[in-house]
Image (cartoon, rainbow, N blue to C red):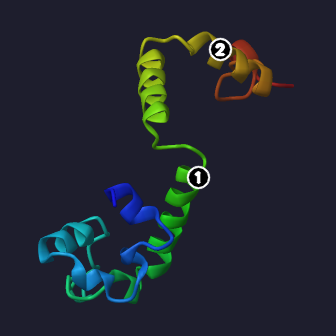
């Protein structure tokens, strides 16, 4: 089973009780390193404890749900990644600047500059 299928398959062993214990200690340390560091006064992360049995559970589950939704929507496929990389290059090159400015105008209208007193051209409002 590929790594991707190992993570996403409904019958994946990583979804089963005790799966955390099948990971190497080094892998568990790397996964814990992705989590926020414990706050002052909290105990350090324990790689022998599955993070889903800690206060991090709701946050991990939410991120997993988002990631699985992305996979269902076709994100992270080779084609999607290539298109995303190309779009990033095109944005840096300014290809979408004019479109973005037009959208800003369409959604928010023009912006008139007034001075800090509220009047135009330095005049007080009457």
Q: Secondary structure at mark 2?
A: helix
**Residue name at image x 66 percent, y 23 percent:** 115
Q: Is residue 21 above or below residue 109?
A: below
Q: Which residue is mark 2?
A: 99
Task: In this rendered view, identify the residue nearer to me: 29 or 2.
Answer: 2
Q: Does 97 sit left or right of 5 as displayed?
A: right
Q: Is residue 103 above or below residue 75?
A: above
Q: Which dot, 1 or 2, sits closer to the camera?
A: 1
Q: What is the residue that sits farthest to the front in this orientation?
A: 1
**Residue name at image x 44 percent, y 25 percent:** 88
Residue 56 in percent (x, y) is at 41, 79
Q: Secondary structure at mark 1?
A: helix
Residue 3 in percent (x, y) is at 32, 58
Q: Does 17 sit left or right of 71 as displayed?
A: left
Tag of residue 72: 1
- Res 37 quadrant in image: bottom left
Q: Does 11 sit left or right of 96 as displayed?
A: left
**Residue name at image x 76 percent, y 18 percent:** 110
**Residue name at image x 32 percent, y 82 percent:** 19
The CA distance from mark 1 to mark 2 is 29 Å
Residue 42 in percent (x, y) is at 27, 88
């Amino acid at each position: 089973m590929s790594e991707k299928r190992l993570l996403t398959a409904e019958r994946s062993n990583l979804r089963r009780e005790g799966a955390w214990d099948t990971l190497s200690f080094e892998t568990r340390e790397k996964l814990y390193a992705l989590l926020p560091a414990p706050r002052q006064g909290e105990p350090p992360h324990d790689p022998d404890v599955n993070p889903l049995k800690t206060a991090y559970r709701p946050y991990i589950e939410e991120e997993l749900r988002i990631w699985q939704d992305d996979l269902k929507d076709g994100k992270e496929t080779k084609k999607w990644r290539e298109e995303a990389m190309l779009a990033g290059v095109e944005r840096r090159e300014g290809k979408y600047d004019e479109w973005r400015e037009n959208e800003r105008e369409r959604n928010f209208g023009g912006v008139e500059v007034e001075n800090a007193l509220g009047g135009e051209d330095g005049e007080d409002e009457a």
